[in-house]
Image (cartoon, rainbow, N blue to C red):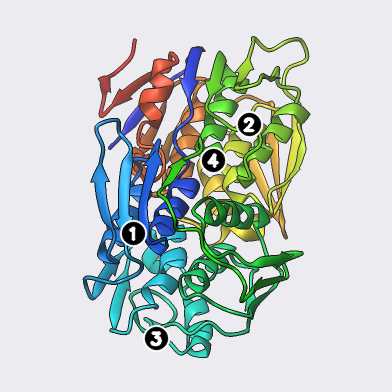
Amino acid sequence: MQVTIQPSLLHGTIHAPASKSSMQRACAAALVRKGESIIRNPGISNDDKAALNVIQALGAKVEHLPDGSLKITSNGVNATTDKINNGESGLGIRMFTPLVAMNSKEITINGEGSLLTRPMDFFDEIFPKLGIEISSNNGKLPLKVKGPLQPKDITIDGSLSSQFLTGLLLAYSASDAKDVTIKVNNLKSKPYVDLTLAVMEEFGLKAPLNKNYEEFTFLSDFVSDESSFVDYTVEGDWSGGAFLLVAGAIAGNITVQGLDLSSTQADKKIIEALQDCNSNIFIGDDEISFPPLGDGGLVAFQFDATDCPDLFPPLVALAAYCKGTTVIDGVHRLIHKESNRALTLQDEFGKMGIEIELKDNQMFIKGGRGVRGAHVHSRHDHRIAMACAVAALKAEGETVIDEAEAVNKSYPNFYEHIKSLGAVIAKNKQLINK
């Protein structure tokens, strides 16, 4: 799909989408927990749908309730098939693979799109230590695993992603691990581990003792709370919401609702950048608004995105309109995303007249010189598509985005949402807002 965006002024109120980080973890927890779980405000992204497909393949029953909620009934991890497909979800493949490995039969785990090129050799190294037979395609998908997983004291590398740890924590909990410890070196994205632990607690699962994010110990005296059903509400998504907030800072008088300021989501840190760049942000009890920008305009800022690398795309869109050179740390976290996002951002924003320089672990964005409309490509990366769309809102001339449907991975309603705020958008040259 091709989307064309005209320079637009935004106004109005919008509700942030459901968090796929929260939704997918809730699906996994509902599978691990024996009994009934209600999930409210469920996500509708491709990654969310993939998570629901996986837990059904692993034995859970999913019912869609009249009010839009989901009822998940589970008797634990009991695979009903020998093939699992995680779609294009990086979190899904890393979180669910240890749960798949709890089964005693061989199961093939696969994915789609860019997930097929992302490294999975973590499992090749760790699984044999847990009594799991595994074979991979030279460290990539598909994987073949045969358990059952046997919880043991292990040490893992957390520098690539915290998502591997999330999967092991859930699998150890489901396997009733006792007096065993997972040690982690150089853990990244610690806020996402906090989210995992918070979801485990809400679902009454056996959770580990967290020692400074370096050791996670499952004690023998913990009793899971499975006495009644769980009623869980999926949080609003700070990752998707970040694009709405940046759109407000750049192009409009808008209000964004549904983002919890007490959330453990790492991407909540976008607020710091919006404050540091002199945006006219107003934070209320249950909403964030952007009245018209005052004198002085947006200014360059410095930001460390090591623990929140998904913020790079909206931060680049923001920095394009900030006078001066913005510096973002954490570039090394971008190599194994849907695309190599550092190079992709450099290329696609270069087409829009924004100079981006990469030095070691830092990205330098030279902004405030004007953004020009251009013909860009999502590179099949949902966050690149959204970043280009947001930057297009105040550009000189129209912007055309190829493979714009990439947003379906995390935020399928994105174009409709910014359209409702006044963005002038055409899909395949058919105008959907005037």
Identified by mark 2, the residue type is: Leu
Give how far apart the Cα atoms at labels 2 and 1 are: 28 Å
- Chain-order first, disc 2 or disc 3: 3
Instruction: State how far apart marks 1 and 4 are (Cα).
Output: 21 Å
Please give the residue where the numbered disc 2 appears in the rendered image.
318
Q: Is residue 81 above or below residue 420?
A: below
Q: Which residue is mark 1?
A: 113
The disc labelled 1 sits on which kind of residue? Answer: Gly
Reading the chain from its start, which is encountered first: label 1 or label 3? 1
Q: Position of residue 380 (x, y in %)?
A: 38, 49
3 and 112: which one is in front?
112
In space, the residues marked 3 and 4 are separated at their CA atoms by 33 Å
User: Residues under labels 1 and 3: Cα distance?
Assistant: 22 Å
Question: Which secondary structure, mark 1?
Answer: helix
Looking at marks 2 and 4 on the same chain, the residue that comes earlier in the sequence is marked by: 4
Is 428 on the left or on the right of 308, as rendered? left
Q: Quadrant of the C terminus?
A: top left
Q: Earlier in the sequence, mark 3 or mark 4?
A: 3
Residue positioned 29% across, 77% down in the render: 108
Q: Is residue 285 above or below residue 85?
A: above
Q: Name, please, the residue furthest toward the left.
A: 81
Q: Which mark is residue 239?
A: 4
Q: Nearer the viewer, mark 1 or mark 3?
A: 3
In this figure, which residue is indicated by the disc labeled 3? 134
Q: Is residue 219 visible?
A: yes
